[in-house]
Image: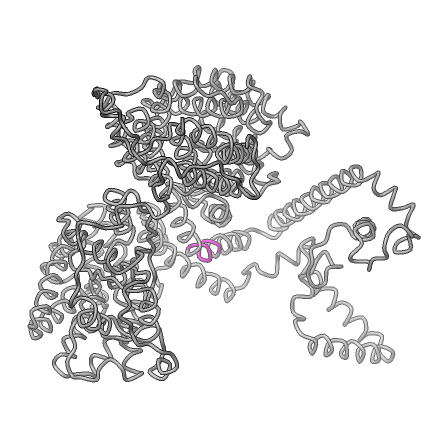
Amino acid sequence: MTRAVQAFKARYNTYYNGHVAYLDGCLAQENGNKDNYTDIIPLYITGNKATVSIGKSDFDRAVEKCQKTIKQHTITKRPEWNSNKRKTEKDRIWLSQKEYNPFLYKAWFLMGKAQFQKGEYLEAASTFAYMEQLYFSHPDIIAEARLLQAKCYAEMEWLYDADGLISDTRRDSFPKKLEWLRSSVEADLQIRRGLYEEAIPNLQKAIKKEKRSKLKARMYFLLGQLYQQVGKPELAYKAYGKTIAKNPPYELEFNARIRQTEVLSTAQNRKKMIKRLNSMAKNAKNKDFLDQIYYAIGNIYLAQNDTMHAVWSYRDGAEKSTRNGVEKGVVLLRLGQLYWDMEEFVKAQECYSQVIGLVDKERDDYDDIDWRSKVLDELLPHAQSIELQDSLQLLARMDSAERMKVINDIIEYVKEQEKKKERSEQLDELKKQTDNAGKQAATAGNKGQIGNNSKTPALWYFYNPTAVASGKTEFQKKWGKRELADNWRRKNKTVLDDFNSEDEVMADSLASDSTSAASTDSISGNAENGESEETENYEEDPHRPEYYLKDIPLTEEQMQASNDILVEALFNAGVIYKDRMENLPLADRTFQRILNDFPAYASIDEVYYNLFQLYSRLDRKDEAEQYRQKLIDEYPENKHVSVISDPDFEYKARFGKHVEDSLYTATYNAFQADDYRTVEANCSISVEEYPEGANRPRFMYLDAMAKLQLGDRAQFMDNMKKIVETYPESSVSELAGLYVKGLKEGRLLASGKMDMGSIWERRIGVGSEEDSLQVDTTFTAEKNCNFVFVIAYVRDSLDENQLLYEMARYNFTNFTVRNFDINIVQGDGINMLQVQTFQNFDEAYIYLHRLQNNEDMAYKLKGLKPFIIAEDNLKKLMRGRSFADYFRFYDDNLEIGTDVNMEESTLDQPTELPEPRNEEEYEDEENEGEENFIF
């Protein structure tokens, strides 16, 4: 009877309120979710990071209500059994369970689901993992908990672990009612791995069980995307049609229609599909989706290898986009990729510079986008110089009439573009005025009453939206749209570019006044001044030929100056093509142009060397040898000659990286063995054989440390400074900088001896010794307080993401009932992974020793420094003490005399679970402030 009452009260009191809050949160997420339809959408809307933040307060409330339900209505005491009644196997299983409230498992599930929806995947996985232990005698609950745990793992990209859990459900007996959930989770994993063909049947099973129309339409859209990926356009078209049939939100419907035109586009019906898309572009309802429409048109052209029309379409999509979002980013990305392939790098840079701020950083190809953007930024000034000087020299070689014709055509084009822009602005303004006609009419009727309306409190002009709107309209009528900038009244600001200070303006003003005064005495002087000023203005006016003629190199000196700019830009661009972009054919053409057009170039020896490298990579041995010999014969003093003249050059070029790595390993081992003379000898070999090797900064670091051990502090300091200055991005640069800083403060080299472990002796968290005197940094031996488990390691000495993964995995495997927080704290040369919070020393001590006794984890953490420390002591450590200080304190005060029962530990108990209560302790509960629907 007690169990039934508690189940009834749990269902209709706190659990009910939590369930309502959970549904409200889910509804808010469904309504607020924004998908990126240009890419494959995630199966679950929680796959969109922005969606996870929606409805958080509702999910927090749901979790709170579930915890309260569990605390108030749990029944853990085993019921008394009639000794006269024989126990069956089923009875024994029932009596062995840990929770006797038959409804409470739903509260556990709801809590885990709420944690999942708000993005707390670790917490949710922990909840479902605990349910496996709590309901070990209920296979249906275990199966569902495992699937939901796998769902959490998938969101954290722990795909291997998620696969393991799904495999467990296949091995054990599995309830048929959960087949749809398993199919859904499997489909999600397969989509994440790119196994679209395998995901389709699982997704279809999941769709059949989805009851919510909006989510079902979204899943059909995803199904269409998968069909499109595997080359089944007819099935994709049908799937998108089912999306439309579900009457989804307009944006989803619009994208489904866009996709339908793409999948059925062929050479035969291309014009028909493009016509349909252009009709969609003319629909005012789609004004905010023009970027996607023109993107689809461009894709159709590109599928038919019509690159020119594809570029035009993508360009229209970018220009007409009203949203600075991921959709515009995708259009610009495709356009930039085409320009890159067409080797129009100036235009490509314009695209990539915008793309980098619009697309999601979680994209698989984001690193490539970022790399291309950086390379194009390096190339841009050189590519622009090449384009400009080539164009100017082309004009210079024309006769006067032909040159003027080209210039006049350019002027006409500029005027045409300005007219288009002006018409576009006028149309936009007219549309705004039409939209705001009612408001403007009301404003006109109340102009004289602003601030004096007896029903409305008087407002200062800029606080009165009506007055501001009216003023804005009047301003735009008179001036049009103007950017907020200096000299905003002028459309052509170039005539004012030279007047950058008040002094200059004043000087010009005075000069103007004096000229005016003089003009009264000299008519000719006035005429000459007017002619000069007019000519100067012409040269700054893009509507005049003088604007273009002034830069054309028409004299021999001007042509030489142009050539100097051009050849330098060609050389720098060629190096970038060769080394950064690895576009060897383009680099070859660029360097050959220098040889042909500018044989007297001052750095022609560097051109030879780059061509030698280029042909060596292309395995064109004869040409490589030709330029190698040219460099040796014509420029014997060149810095590269000694390297390429080495008889073993080819061997070093091919195997040098491996040989250098081996030499570094031997040098490091010698250092560890205190064989400093060998370290010096090997570092000398490194300088001679691999002066530009990848391990150069590491060799310098070991050489500096060896010099220090041998008593040469000055050389140690010099080497450390060189590392910081020459290789600021290397992994040892920061550590070298810390040594230099410590030496300047006189803190690290008190003794004449130092080894690699000395960094643990360095005080952390303060800039000088005096700082530490201002706070109490005395460690305390209190054990009954919160403790933290710490792994300390030298920064950049390991893969931090892998360490996080291994520790989180270990915790989930061994402490499923505890929810430990794991985070990494950055320090000066030493980072710390912290696991917290442990309720006392005993818990932390047991955790440390279990970890050390785990063979797998002990192997993975080999060489690291794990330890436990009280939270207060950790704060003191960070305020001027060293790790070595704490290790000594721990050994003397905490480790000695430790008597901890390793078998019994609160680590194996959840921190927030209620204490067991007897049946007679249950009474009707009055929940203050609770919405009681039944009691």
Q: Answer left or right for 826 relative to 308.
A: left
> In the picture shown, does residue 506 fall above or below 405?
below
Closer to us: 438 or 534? 438
Residue found 15% across the figure and 74% down from its top: 755
User: On the rendered image, what quadrant is the C terminus found in?
Assistant: top right
Q: Which residues are magenta?
A: 379-384
Q: How many marks?
A: 0
Q: Is residue 187 visible?
A: yes
Residue 526 % position (x, y): 81, 73
**Depth check, front residue: 3 or 399:** 3
862 and 77: which is toward the camera: 77
Does the rendering let one see residue 34?
no
Magenta segment: does it hold 381? yes
User: Is residue 732 depicted above or below 163 in this figure?
Assistant: below
In the rendered view, does 374 fall on the left or right side of 718? right
Seen as rendered, the residue at the extreme front is: 84
- Picture quarter containing residue 235? top left
Q: What color scheme is it?
A: one colour
Q: Quadrant of residue 122?
A: top left
Residue 268, given in percent of the width and then of the height, sits at: 49, 15
Q: Is residue 812 left or right of residue 711?
A: right
Residue 68 coordinates in the image, percent (x, y):
45, 41
Residue 756 in the image: above or below residue 100: below
Depicted 687 relative to depicted 507: above or below: above
791 relative to 483 in the view: left or right: left
Q: Residue at x 84, y 38 (%)?
A: 438
Q: Which of the image's four quarters has the N terminus?
A: top left
Residue 586 colored in magenta in the image: no
The foreground one among 644 and 630 is 644
Provide residue 313's location: percent of width, then percent of height: 55, 33
Majority secondary structure of magenta residues? helix
